[in-house]
Image: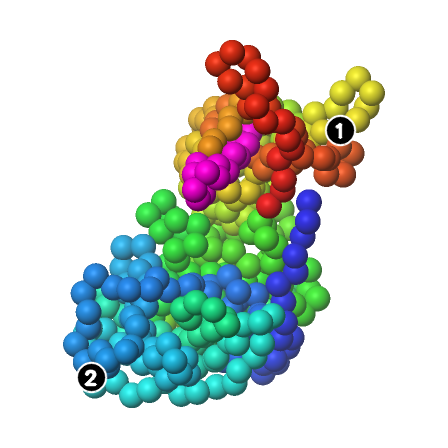
Amino acid sequence: MKKVTLAAASWFLLFPLSLSLRADGTFPLQYQQLTDPSHACAVKARQFLHRGVERVPAGLKPGFTCYSARTPGRTSLLVALDPSNPSHCYADTDGDGDLSDESPLPRGGTRRQGTTSVYQLGPVFVQARGAEAGSRSALRVEVYKAPIGSPSVAVYPAGVMSGRVTLGGRTYQVGVVDGDYDGRYDGVLSASSGPTGGDWLAIDLNGDGRIDGDIYGAGEIMPLPKMIRVNGTYYGIEVAQDGSAISLLRTEPDVGVLDIGYPHAELTLLSDSGPYRLSGNGGRWQLPAGQYFTTSVRMSSTDSRRDTWTLQGEGNTGRLASFGIRGGETLSLRAGPPLTIKTEARSVGTGLVSIGCLVAGQAGEEYLPGVQKNGRLQKAPKFKIIDERGRTGVSDSFEYG
């Protein structure tokens, strides 16, 4: 499985050595600016805004385009920019839907991302619509301008509440990020927030001074959980609303069982008890009671020649996408083989049809059509189009991409 490390600025820059440690399980956090857009905390909490809004805000200048973001259930952000001058940008900092009283965002640097120019703006303090009074969030704005097409706009937190915690005699660097831009740091992962709708916790578990992320979510940065397992011990987590402190106290969670009915499976999960990568054990695992989201599925099978065939699913995970585990109970969610292969066709122009191939498991989880044999991707499958008389009209191969 391909792993991507998402890390940039040294955590020694984010965690001053002067912070004192306490032995009672509550540890102070201090605000540190997050200036590197490639840092894991920026990457995970970054959100691209939607172009256009339902209601045009007051004070919108002629020629400007609006972009907005809505986080689950609570907040809304509004940004407007001049497409001909992407660094000329405004944000609705007081959440009143009126841009006439706003000043242009501070301009930062510009970087290149392939042929795209990325304009960095801010930081700016925003009172998002729907957030509690006085809850302001510090954000940085990025405008992506490609040679062709309209600009894209993204935002990410301008800082991290950072510090150090001591668990089981070891010290770990930690950070908490306002991932939903509501000015609070205690937004725990839940069924209503979804796996990316709340705040984020980063913890340097391997002590290398960096935060290791991975494309499937099971790294050292995760949606803020209610508890986390460190070296075999679970710790309940509470973060102060203003992010000034974090408490981690030992706990013994209720446990239940997830049974997917297929022994050669690997699942990557995000949950309110932290991230998990599950494999083996006959496809049956004990897990703390709580809410779970599946970010990737991997199924393997070994044939009589001892060749191992593997399918990977990273998008629609069907009934595995979101589920709850109850203490003392078994949740059966049959997944994997027998597999269903479907084709879909759609018109892409005059006289042109695109034909796709879809592989699905018992839980409705979808797999990429490319199968690996002993770790090597095999050739794309072939197909034929046969008319009502059984005659072959077209015979060709699918293409990846």
From the top left corner, tell me how far across and down residue 94 is, in percent.
24, 78
Quick check: marks 1 and 2 in contact, CB under 8 Å? no
For the point 53% across and 65% down, the residue is 43
Question: Which is in the foreground here, disc 1 or disc 2?
Answer: 2
What residue type is disc 1 on? Thr
Residue 240 seen by the camera? no
Q: Secondary structure at mark 1?
A: strand
In this image, 41 relative to 122: left or right?
right
Q: Disc 1 and disc 2: Cα gap in Å?
A: 63 Å
Q: Nearer the viewer, residue 379 or 32?
A: 379
- Element marked by disc 2: loop
Is residue 354 one of those drawn in magenta? yes
Q: Position of residue 80 (x, y in %)?
A: 31, 75
- Disc 1 crowd rating (10 Å Cα; few below 14, some 14-19, many 20+) is some
Q: Nearer the viewer, residue 162 or 373?
A: 373
Amino acid type indicated by mark 2: Ser
Can residue 139 be seen here?
yes
Label 2, on which residue? 100
Residue 137, x across and y down, in percent = 35, 74
Residue 315 on the magenta segment: no
Residue at 54% in and 72% down: 116
Give residue 224's quadrant in the image: bottom left
Residue in view at x 28 percent, y 78 percent: 63
The answer to whether residue 400 is left or right of residue 320 is right
Picture quarter with the N terminus: top right
Mark 2 surroundings: few (<14), some (14-19) or many (≥20) residues within 10 A = few
Q: Which residue is mark 1?
A: 308
State the extent of the magenta-drawn residues as a range: 346-360
**Depicted 245 relative to depicted 326: above or below:** below
